[in-house]
Image: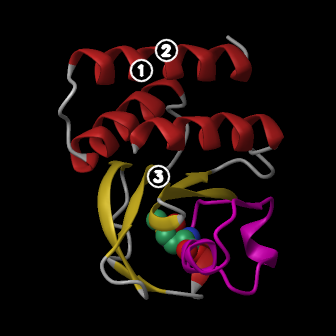
Amino acid sequence: MSKVLKYKDISRTLKNIFLVEKNLSMQAKMAITSSVLHSSFNHWLFCGFYVTRDKKTLEIGPYQGQIIPCTHIPIGKGVCGTTLKDKKTHIVNDVSQHLNYISCDSNARSEIVVPIFKYKEVVAVLDIDSPLPSDFNEIDQLSLEKISKIIY
Ligand code: SME
């Protein structure tokens, strides 16, 4: 199945779940989202959320993957902390060439990090690591940004 169709399927599935289960917390939605995403893209090494503890630190949230991720990331550090700081999606095609990259898995080759907003504030980021170089493009960005909007 193509990426576009996979993401359409994922969006439909999540919207249906969140429509039926109206009072889900953000925590629950993030847990379900990481699971549904990872089931479709099972080659990803890590697919999960970091949540803002205060406005300056991210803490690990619900995720899927085999690795033990770093638990806290300060604002401006790594791709996740940079996303918290500048409030926009980041795609890293080759993590070995990225100076401000925090490595949690030596098999990771590319990464995408998408901010999750509540009232224009970043309350979490969605972080995905792939073992394939340049695995993420504008299809992933647009699709994941749409998905990020149904979490909040
Ligand atoms: N690579 C991330 C750190 C989190 S792990 O990949 C799960 C970063 O640079 O912020």
Residue 8 seen by the camera: yes
Please state which amino acid type lies under the numbered disc 3.
Answer: Phe
Give the SS element for disc 2. Answer: helix
Q: State the CA–CA distance, disc 1 to disc 3.
A: 23 Å
Label 2 beta carbon less than 8 Å to ligand 1: no
The residue carrying mark 2 is 12
Q: Residue furthest front?
A: 119
Name which quarter of the figure residue 60 lies in: bottom left
- Indicate which disc residue 46 carries: 3
Q: Name the residue under label 1.
A: 15
Q: Which mark is residue 60?
A: none
* Disc 3 secondary structure class: strand
Q: Across the whole image, how many numbered discs are drawn on residues?
A: 3
Element at label 1: helix
Q: Are marks 1 and 2 in contact (CB under 8 Å)?
A: yes
133 relative position to 123: left or right: right
Report the span colored magenta.
Answer: 80-109
Q: Quadrant of the C terminus?
A: top left
**From the viewer's perspective, is residue 89 above or below residue 87?**
above
Q: What residue type is labelled 1?
A: Lys
Q: Quadrant of the N terminus?
A: top right
Q: Position of residue 125 (x, y in %)?
A: 49, 61
